[in-house]
Amino acid sequence: MNDHDDILIRCHELTKHYRRGDRTVTPLQALDLLVSRGEYLALMGPSGSGKTTLLNLVAGIDSPSEGKLEVCGQDLTQLSRGRLARWRAHHVGYIFQLYHLVPVLTAFENVELPLLLDDLSRRERRERVESTLALVGLDDRMHHFPRELSGGQEQRVAIARALVGSPELLVADEPTGDLDREAADAVLGLLRSLSREYGKTIVMVTHDPRAAQAADRILHLEKGRLLEQEGA
């Protein structure tokens, strides 16, 4: 078993209920999970299996109904909605399938957005944005608008935006789902590099077995329960 300090995510009997009309839906049921610092974890399973629910819980976007959830040393069940939002801004970067870039802003400006809430000088913001765009291989595209970029380049801008605040945890919801194979492979290679070379902890939801093979470990969910785990 890993030492306590090596664990970034601890889920114990994690359960989530929703009310849908007059019935209760339980996308996650008493799930136990440990994720080590620097680990690259893939979540797989059919639609409705609880993958995205789990992703949103560990990212602090949603709150569990029951159980314990500790991420980056913080018990998320003890935080109010406002404190949870502040915690998320400092510890988590979220990568979406459809990028969610602002079309009227350049790549530089899109990546800079999360930093505008921080107490940084303009020079500090510029240096951080430029170094992050260079990290994802887009330092020569920083003044281009999203419409001037390929899908793969847009996703790399989105990854840079998620990274620019130096979060401990990156969560990715189908990050290659809208990309062709060449672009998808480039994004997966970037994510693996961020885990192996920069120590980022990554939790990725994917339907693509090939994408999942880029991870250190694959976790299968069905009907809110953990079925099996396998190394990549």
Image (cartoon, rainbow, N blue to C red):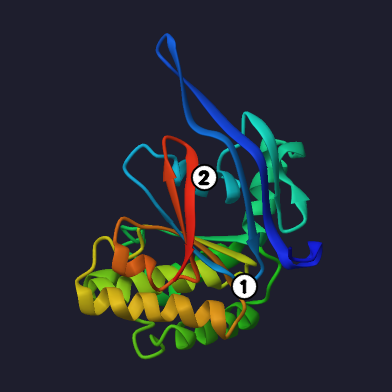
Residue 101 bears which disc, if any? none
Q: Is residue 227 above or below residue 155?
A: above
**Residue found at the far top of this picture:** 22
Residue 38 bears which disc, if any? 1
Residue at point 22%, 70% (across, down): 147
Residue at point 56%, 39% (across, down): 62
Dot 2: what SS? helix
**Quadrant of the image for the N terminus?**
bottom right
The residue that label 2 is drawn on is: 54
Q: CA distance from mark 1 to mark 2?
A: 19 Å
Q: Is residue 186 above or below residue 84?
A: below
- The amino acid type, in three-letter code, at marker 2 is Leu
Q: Is residue 216 above or below residue 1?
A: below
**Quadrant of the image for the C terminus?**
bottom left
Q: Is residue 195 above or below residue 9?
A: below
- The amino acid type, in three-letter code, at marker 1 is Gly
Residue at point 40%, 87% (across, down): 137
From the viewer's side, name the closer residue of 8 and 95.
Answer: 8
**Residue found at the far left of this picture:** 180
Q: Is residue 3 left or right of residue 178?
A: right
Q: Position of residue 228 (x, y in %)?
A: 48, 52
